[in-house]
């Protein structure tokens, strides 16, 4: 399925968020300051990932400025793998990783809440993450290439790396298994092993940070589908090792109803289904978005019609539902359409096209109606 392949593209381009790039870009975006609203409140933090619209220093800087001017939480999702041996031995990390982390932390304002996610899963969501080395994602070296989720060395190495990154990022929320739902669906045997991993990692990190909420996240499927039922049944096996349940949700692409480009056609329980899965745990949206233009990806047999008005309707539905469910936070994936990045570094890749036009700003840095809805909610006092 498409969602399972999503991280493959992310990993290939994530380096531009973290290291210096050269070249010119459009004029920087000016921060927006919300106007306080006296009577309305929101339960959740609002924010974005620092996904840039072009592979330039200016675009990266502008993106950080814009997301922090219009959000109170910043998402940092480390997706290149785990430096397994260095983490296990607690030795010096490769310089490339240090540069990556320093770039992120230096550009994140100290008054912003941080959501941190670190991948223990591989790109296909069916095995352990690769090694994160000097050159980025690499095959796991021996003996790590033969170890499984239930090996104690795996939980110890991951915990050590997680604790190190928690010290660096100082997050308010930590996700130790993004989209673990895909492992449930892809390899039940490995998920059996993951249950052991989950318990050990939860205990290790809680021992050092008892007040830090620990999360896993679920890629939501069509409500009442077989996949949704399978996820719900198996999530109960790790629920004791989860404080908050995160969700990634893109109904226009990954749900099964007809005419998916119009949010009015979403099932009534398109997002409230998480309540039955989470079993009373608090919830948060770790990743979402909606296309503001028609989208056709022939290689996937995908074609839906949408526009800026329908995107605005989705943002309103999203935030209203998040408030009614008393969610912890909402992360919108990309704040600006990344046409320049797609036409350049991404090589007009079919997979990355699925999210290209989901910005609250278009590729010319013009805000869309959805941004006005976002700002109105952001102006509310957080309760």
Image (cartoon, rainbow, N blue to C red):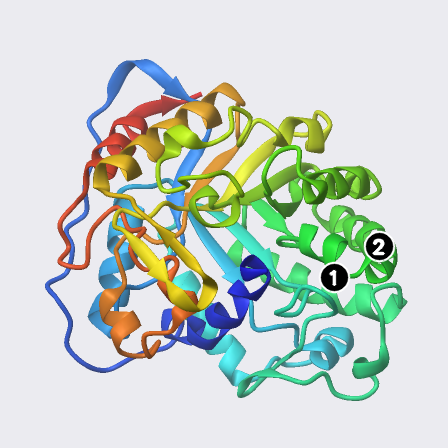
Residue 112 appears in the rendering: no
Q: Residue at x 37, y 77 (%)?
A: 19
Q: Is residue 329 above or below residue 48?
A: above
In space, the residues marked 2 and 1 are separated at their CA atoms by 8 Å
In this image, 361 relative to 93: left or right? left
Residue 258, given in percent of the width and then of the height, sits at 45, 39
Numbered label tally: 2
Q: Is residue 69 above or below residue 125?
A: above
Residue 138, given in percent of the width and then of the height, sits at 62, 85
Mark sitting earlier along the chain (2/1): 1
Q: Is residue 28 above or below residue 170?
A: below
Q: Residue furthest top?
A: 39
Cβ–Cβ below 8 Å for labels 2 and 1? Answer: yes
**Numbered badge on residue 225:** none
Which of these two is toward me, 261 or 156? 261
Label 1 sits on residue: 159
Q: Residues within 10 Å of mark 1 (few under 14, many from 20)?
A: many
Q: Residue at x 42, y 74 (%)?
A: 13
Which of these two is toward me, 147 or 226? 226
Residue 191 appears in the rendering: yes
Residue 74, given in percent of the width and then of the height, sits at 42, 49
In this image, 295 relative to 147: left or right? left
Q: Residues within 10 Å of mark 2 (few under 14, many from 20)?
A: many
Label 2 sits on residue: 200
Q: Quadrant of the C terminus?
A: top left
């Amino acid at each position: 399925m498409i969602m399972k392949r999503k991280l493959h593209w992310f990993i290939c381009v994530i380096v531009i968020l973290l290291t210096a790039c050269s070249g010119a870009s459009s004029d920087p975006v000016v921060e927006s300051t919300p106007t306080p609203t006296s009577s309305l409140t929101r339960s959740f933090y609002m924010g974005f990932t620092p996904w840039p619209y072009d592979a330039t220093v200016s675009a990266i800087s502008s993106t950080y400025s814009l997301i922090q001017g219009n959000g109170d939480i910043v998402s940092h999702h480390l997706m290149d793998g785990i430096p397994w041996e260095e983490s296990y031995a607690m030795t010096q990390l490769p310089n490339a990783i240090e540069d990556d982390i320093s770039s992120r932390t230096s550009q994140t304002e100290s008054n912003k809440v941080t959501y941190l996610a670190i991948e223990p899963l591989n790109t296909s969501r069916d095995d352990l993450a690769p090694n994160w080395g000097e050159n980025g994602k690499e095959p796991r070296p021996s003996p790590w290439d033969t170890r499984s989720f239930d090996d104690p060395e795996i939980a110890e190495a991951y915990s050590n790396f997680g604790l190190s990154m928690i010290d660096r990022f100082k997050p308010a929320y930590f996700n130790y298994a993004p989209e673990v739902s895909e492992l449930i669906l892809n390899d039940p045997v490995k998920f059996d092993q993951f249950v052991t991993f989950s318990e050990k990692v939860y205990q290790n990190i809680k021992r050092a940070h008892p007040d830090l909420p620990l999360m896993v996240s679920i890629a939501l499927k069509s409500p009442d589908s077989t996949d949704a039922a399978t996820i719900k049944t198996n999530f109960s096996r790790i629920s004791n090792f989860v404080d908050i349940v995160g969700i990634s949700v893109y109904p226009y692409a990954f749900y099964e109803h007809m005419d998916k480009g119009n949010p009015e056609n979403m099932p009534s329980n398109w997002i409230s289904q998480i309540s039955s899965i989470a079993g009373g745990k608090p919830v948060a949206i770790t990743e979402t978005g909606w296309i503001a233009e028609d989208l056709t990806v022939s290689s996937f047999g995908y074609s839906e019609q949408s526009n800026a008005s329908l995107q605005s309707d989705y943002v309103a539905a999203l935030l209203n539902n998040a408030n009614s469910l008393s969610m912890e936070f909402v992360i919108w994936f990309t704040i600006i359409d990344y046409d320049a990045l797609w036409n350049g570094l991404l090589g007009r890749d079919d997979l990355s096209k699925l999210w290209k036009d989901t910005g609250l700003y278009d590729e010319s840095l013009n805000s869309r109606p959805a941004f006005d809805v976002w700002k109105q909610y952001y102006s509310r006092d957080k309760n």
